[in-house]
Amino acid sequence: MKPQPSPLAYVPFVSVENMMRLTNAIGPETLMTELAGYIEEDFKRWPEFDKTPRVASHSRDGVIELMPTADATNYGFKYVNGHPKNMREGYQTVTAFGVLSSVANGYPVLLTEMTVLTALRTAATSALVGKYLAPKGASVMAMIGNGAQCEFQALAFRALCGITTLRLYDIDASATDKAAANLVAQGFDVVKCGSAMEAVEGAHIITTCTADKQYATILTDNLVGAGVHINAIGGDCPGKTELHRDILLRSSIFVEYPPQTRIEGEIQQLDEDHAVTELWQVMRGEAPGRTDARQITLFDSVGFAIEDFSALRYIHDRIAGSDYFTKLDMLADPDDPRDLFGMVMRAA
Ligand code: NAD
């Protein structure tokens, strides 16, 4: 169902509580599989979208970003922050909300929390890309960085790529203990590891999902063997990367939107004209994905607005006719559209 101009004087609002109810009712793996379908559909019609690198406001400790995009029917944006120090102070590193609007009259048709939804859409995107690039028969994934995104990534990779064993590593052992407990409860075979080197042993897919505002080296070149797929999601800001440059030079690199990834992704370490492949072209069959069993494929993920647009579209469709939202009094609605002032006075 395509969102239409709302005939209603309210905007549906999905709170964190309702997002959790919806996720539990559908089941996170089913939800992320359905969401991956929306993302794939939108990637396959990539040229139809207005696109711009996200608008980022950097400060000493973090970044606040707006991520807009639109097609002919809908406009969407996400507000999102990234503050690696937050976690130590008891706050989320990443928190977000978003809006979907009708292009026809500009009215918002959905306002939703997007902290949980970002974790779901990031994992759905990673696993969707994994479906195109991971080696055949992949069952073991190393997960380096066991914070907020970790379990969502694991579940999406099971649902879409068949991952059953997870090798977990975090510099903070309590994060690994948390993730291990959650993931054993979800039926995974879990191996807790004491180093990144131990985590990547025998892994077909390596997910790096760490948060640090610096050029970090989570993976060094000697840790990456032939044939693996790397899902690098933590390096997503200028000055914030996870992989040693030599890995990039040995990999076939796949990206969302090059003008944004060249600023924020792992490839900020490379020359501006270093060849990368755009994922939408792989999904449309216009560019090759994995072509050889020994190839190292790298998804240099930074998170692009179209993934959030797909997530907003999905939630809008999913809450129709349900009670997973509340009605927000966010649209002024005078009987005479020109009598906004009279409406205010009559309310006195
Ligand atoms: P989080 O703070 O909850 O977890 C990050 C974890 O990384 C922490 O447990 C921390 O101890 C660990 N870590 C830090 N340095 C490490 C190192 N050198 N080795 C091993 N572990 C290390 O953060 P999160 O919400 O899980 O997000 C993780 C990263 O993913 C952030 O950088 C965030 O900006 C990024 N992110 C990317 C996307 C995307 O679309 N690409 C989406 C959401 C989040």
Image (tube, rainbow, N blue to C red):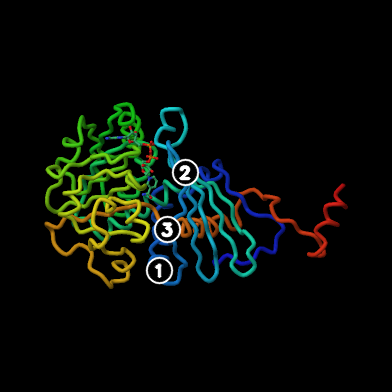
Instruction: Verify CB contact (< 8 Å) between mark 1 and mark 2.
Output: no
Circle 1 is placed at which residue position? 46
Type of amino acid under label 1: Trp
**Quarter of the picture for ligand 1?**
top left
Q: Residue at x 16, y 36 (%)?
A: 197
How far across and down, in percent of the image, does residue 342 sit? 86, 57
Circle 2 is placed at which residue position? 81
Q: Nearer the viewer, residue 190 or 273?
A: 273
Residue 182 placement: quadrant:
top left
Q: Earlier in the sequence, mark 1 or mark 3?
A: 1
Type of amino acid under label 3: Pro
Q: Residue at x 20, y 36 (%)?
A: 196
Q: Residue at x 62, y 70 (%)?
A: 104
Q: Is residue 166 above or below residue 100?
A: above
Instruction: Verify CB contact (< 8 Å) between mark 2 and mark 3.
Output: no
Residue 24 visible (yes or no): no
Q: Is residue 169 above or below residue 12?
A: above
Q: Nearer the viewer, residue 250 or 195?
A: 250
Q: SS of the residue at dot 1? A: helix
Q: CA distance from mark 1 to mark 2?
A: 25 Å
In the displayed structure image, the side of residue 117 where residue 346 appears, left or right: right
How far across and down, in percent of the image, does residue 51 sit? 44, 64
Q: Nearer the viewer, residue 144 or 274?
A: 274
Circle 3 is placed at which residue position? 53
CB of mark 1 near ligand 1 (< 8 Å): no
Q: CA distance from mark 2 to mark 3?
A: 15 Å
Q: Earlier in the sequence, mark 1 or mark 2?
A: 1
How far across and down, in percent of the image, does residue 155 sit? 34, 46
